[in-house]
């Protein structure tokens, strides 16, 4: 308290420390690809399970209520063997290469299947080989691969 309170000015406390406000400012200016990388790094460092059902890894909403890591096996080793026997139903799609003459068409198709902006899609295409979409159902993955193949891209399911 540094003296009398000016009742004409609203008394607003700035949220967070200077360090936190600067960090928030930097995060706000990240591209979607950079946000995705940040999410993946934080998930790894904080030992959090990958977000599912959200494009580009999600935004880590509700981290406090996340379920325990699926790596915690309480079945004494039987679960991984059973999991391996099951057929994989969700795949990551990886852009391996593309015809340089069809780059614009590939970028347009990447935008259509990922909901990325033009700059983010261009950056993604230029970063080949790169995962363009994660946890895609097999039927959807095959359709996306066919569309991208039509415009000159080579995409694989992992």
Image: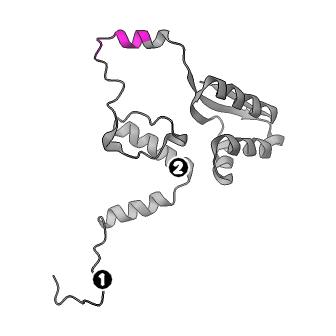
Q: Is residue 79 magenta?
A: yes
Q: State which mark lies toward you, 1 or 2.
A: 1
Q: Quadrant of residue 110?
A: top right
Determine whether 86 is above or below 114 in the image. Answer: above
For mark 2, give the secondary structure: helix
> At 36% from the left edge and 39% from the top edge, which residue is drawn?
45
Q: Is residue 126 left or right of residue 32?
A: right
- Give the x, y percent position of residue 73: 31, 19
Indicate left or right for 121 with 54 as reference: right
Q: Tell me where residue 82 appears, x and y as whole percent.
A: 42, 10
Residue at mark 1 to residue at mark 2: CA–CA distance: 37 Å
Q: Is residue 80 above or below residue 139?
A: above
User: Who is closer to the viewer here, 3 or 65?
Assistant: 65
Please rate how many residues cluster around mark 2, counting C-alpha atoms within 10 Å: few if below 14, some from 14 to 19, many from 20: few
Mark 1 neighbour density, 10 Å: few (under 14) some (14–19) many (20 or more):
few
In this picture, which residue range is highlighted in magenta? 74-82
**Is residue 33 toward the left or the right of residue 76 in the image?**
right
Residues 119 and 78: in front is 78
Residue 100 is a magenta residue: no
Please name the residue shown 15% across and 82% down the image: 1
Residue at screen point 34% across, 29% down: 69
- Residue 20 location in percent, x, y? 34, 61
Q: Position of residue 34 (x, y in %)?
A: 52, 49
Please, what secondary structure does the residue beneath circle 1 have? loop
The C terminus - image quarter: top right
* Mark found first going from the N terminus, 1 or 2: 1
Please give the label number shown on residue 124. Answer: none
Identify the mark at residue 10; answer none if there is no mark.
1
Residue positioned 30% across, 83% down in the render: 10
Answer whether labels 1 and 2 touch (C-beta < 8 Å). Answer: no
Which dot marks residue 34? 2
Residue that extends furthest to the right in the rendered view of this protein: 101
């Amino acid at each position: 308290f540094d003296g009398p309170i000016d009742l004409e000015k609203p008394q607003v406390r700035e949220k967070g420390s200077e360090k936190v406000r600067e960090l928030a400012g930097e995060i706000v200016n990240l591209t979607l690809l950079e946000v995705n990388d940040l999410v993946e790094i934080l998930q790894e460092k904080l030992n959090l399970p990958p977000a599912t059902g959200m494009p580009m890894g999600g935004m880590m909403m509700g981290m406090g209520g996340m379920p325990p890591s699926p790596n915690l096996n309480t079945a004494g080793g039987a679960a991984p063997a059973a999991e391996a026997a099951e057929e994989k139903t969700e795949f990551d799609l990886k852009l391996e290469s593309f015809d340089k003459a069809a780059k614009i068409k590939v970028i347009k198709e990447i935008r259509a299947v990922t909901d990325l902006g033009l700059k983010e899609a261009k950056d993604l295409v230029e970063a080949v080989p790169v995962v363009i979409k994660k946890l895609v159902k097999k039927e959807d993955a095959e359709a996306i691969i066919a569309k991208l193949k039509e415009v000159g891209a080579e995409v694989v399911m992992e």
